[in-house]
Amino acid sequence: MYEYVPNNVAARPAVLVAVHYCTGSGPAFYSGTEFASLADRYGFIVIYPSATRSGACFDVSSPQALRHDGGSDPVGIVSMVRYAQQRHNADPNRVYVTGASSGAMMTNVLLGDYPDVFKAGAAFAGVPFGCFATTDGSGWNSACANGTITKTPQAWGDLARGAYPGYQGARPRMQLWHGTEDGTLHYPNFGEEIKQWTNVLGVSQTPALTDRPQPTWTRTRYGATGNQAPVEAISVQGTGHSLPAAGMAARAITFFGLDAG
């Protein structure tokens, strides 16, 4: 793990976990995204996990990874959060996760596995919780990547809820981003994620608000119309597998509420 603690860190800071893409690293995600500069502005801590396996992808596929305290990378990342909470007196009620590609898939996984730890997530070009599941030891699921796995909202929701049987507490909010021309984790996954998280959060699949914050962005909010709606989804027209782009990290920080002082 790598940690970014700004000079003006709050007395009881929030924690943001920022999870890199395949072939990436914690330091690469630090230097290639705007989360650290936003931490400077708002005083929260950023944790950058680094995947250590071949290809530098995170495990979002194994049965262990898709279960609360089951093992593998999700347990490692939650251990990082607990370390930061102890070391920096961080606020356990303000823990968030974001990521791109493999990191976006991990964002979905962590919200399913640890709804008791994370208050919200922002997934840039990911897939639903459980979509990448495999049982043959492979870390890659072509059917999911190609956008050919579709389920009902209830079935997707059951997959996420099944990660932590017996959990009855609050569920984390989710912000979803996807480029319409994504050739790696294809665009249908965006709609499947929306089905999953609206079901998990118990809100209508009909948007409460639809707008365009930028000319190529179509934003839909579900369950409420404000900046912290239960589910927020931003479709980016004409963009491939290259998120987050400039300005998107700040939108995630607003969705988390970390810019509220």
Image (cartoon, rainbow, N blue to C red):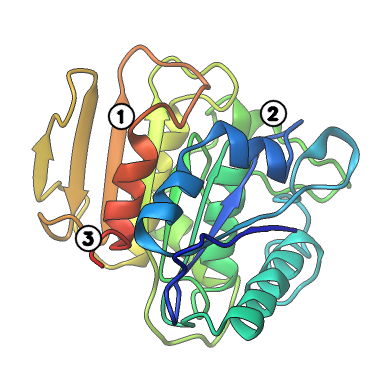
Whether residue 131 is visible here, answered yes or no, is: no
Dot 2: within a 10 Å radius of its alpha carbon, few (fewer than 14), some, or many (20 or more) residues?
few
Residue at (45% x, 32% y) in the render:
244
The amino acid marked with disc number 1 is Ser
**Quick one: quadrant of the N terminus?**
bottom right
Foreground mark, 1 or 2, reads: 1
The amino acid marked with disc number 3 is Gln
Q: Earlier in the sequence, mark 1 or mark 2?
A: 2
Tell me if label 3 and label 1 are in contact, CB under 8 Å: no
Per the image, the residue denoted by label 1 is 235
**Image location (x, y in percent) of residue 246:** 38, 27
Within the image, what quadrant is residue 203 found in?
bottom left
- For the residues labelled 3 and 2, the Cα–Cα distance comes to 33 Å
Is 166 placed left or right of 255 in the picture?
right
**Image location (x, y in percent) of residue 54:** 90, 37
Per the image, the residue denoted by label 3 is 228
Per the image, the residue denoted by label 2 is 142
